[in-house]
Amino acid sequence: MTQIDTYLSQAIDSYPYDLKETIESLDYALSYDENNVGALCLYGRVYSEQMPRYEQAKSYFQKALSIDLQAIEVYPYYIQTLLLNEDFDEAKKLINFAMTVKGINKLEVLSKKIQCLEILGEYDEVKQILKEMELLLLNFDYKDFIEETKKRISNKEKLLKETVVKKVKKK
């Protein structure tokens, strides 16, 4: 194990419980190799999930992907950061690209796409993606997510219909 691997392992072990130790270990790791994709990704996560400084997080994720487009561990965190920062068009583009990356967890990426579309109120598209996810299922890891999302979307559609009916009655 190299020195950078040691520091990166320490950062991973410390995250998210000891941010001081995480950041210190990441700084050491990046001092050995400023282009270490794992360290850049974890730094992006720190800025996105703990700080939240989405623009800084995005820069770390962008750098990581500029070094290695096949870094499948980066995509879900980067997409989530884009969603939190309300960069929906950028998120959609990244999702579409991520789906072409060999070895990526397509179910995880599709779950992010569902989040994006649900935020935007595109419920019919969400339903289509849920069907696509069901076809990709190989175990029960995402079964609960699919079922809960179906219920949530159904409830939202009912609320929208009720709201429209109430508006019509008021007129």
Image (cartoon, helix red, strand yellow):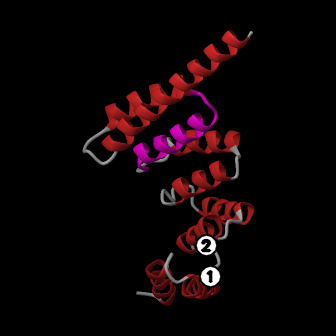
Membership of 126 in magenta stretch: no
Residue at the location (47% across, 83% down)? 5
Q: Is residue 12 above or below residue 142?
A: below
Specify the amino acid type for callout 2: Tyr
Front: mark 2 or 1: 2
Q: Is residue 56 above or below residue 9?
A: above
User: Do the CB atoms of the residues marked 2 and 1 lie less than 8 Å apart?
Assistant: yes
Residue 104 in the image: x percent, y percent? 43, 50
Residue at the location (50% across, 86% down)? 7
Nearer to the camera, 39 or 117 = 117
**Which of disc 1 and disc 2 is earlier in sequence?**
1
* Spatial CA span between label 2 and label 1: 10 Å
Residue at the location (61% across, 72% down)? 43
Q: Callout 2: helix, strand or loop?
A: helix
Residue 52 in the image: x percent, y percent? 67, 65
Nearer to the camera, 159 or 144 = 159
Residue 85 in the image: x percent, y percent? 70, 52
Quarter of the N terminus within the rendering:
bottom left
Q: Is residue 153 left or right of residue 35?
A: left
Question: What residue does disc 2 label?
Answer: 43
Main SS of the magenta part reads: helix
Residue at the location (40% across, 50% down)? 103
Membership of 111 in magenta stretch: yes
Q: Callout 1: helix, strand or loop?
A: helix
Which segment is the magenta one? 104-122
Question: What residue does disc 1 label?
Answer: 30
Q: Residues within 10 Å of mark 2 (few under 14, many from 20)?
A: many
Label ID, residue 86: none
* Outermost residue to the front: 170
Specify the amino acid type for callout 1: Leu
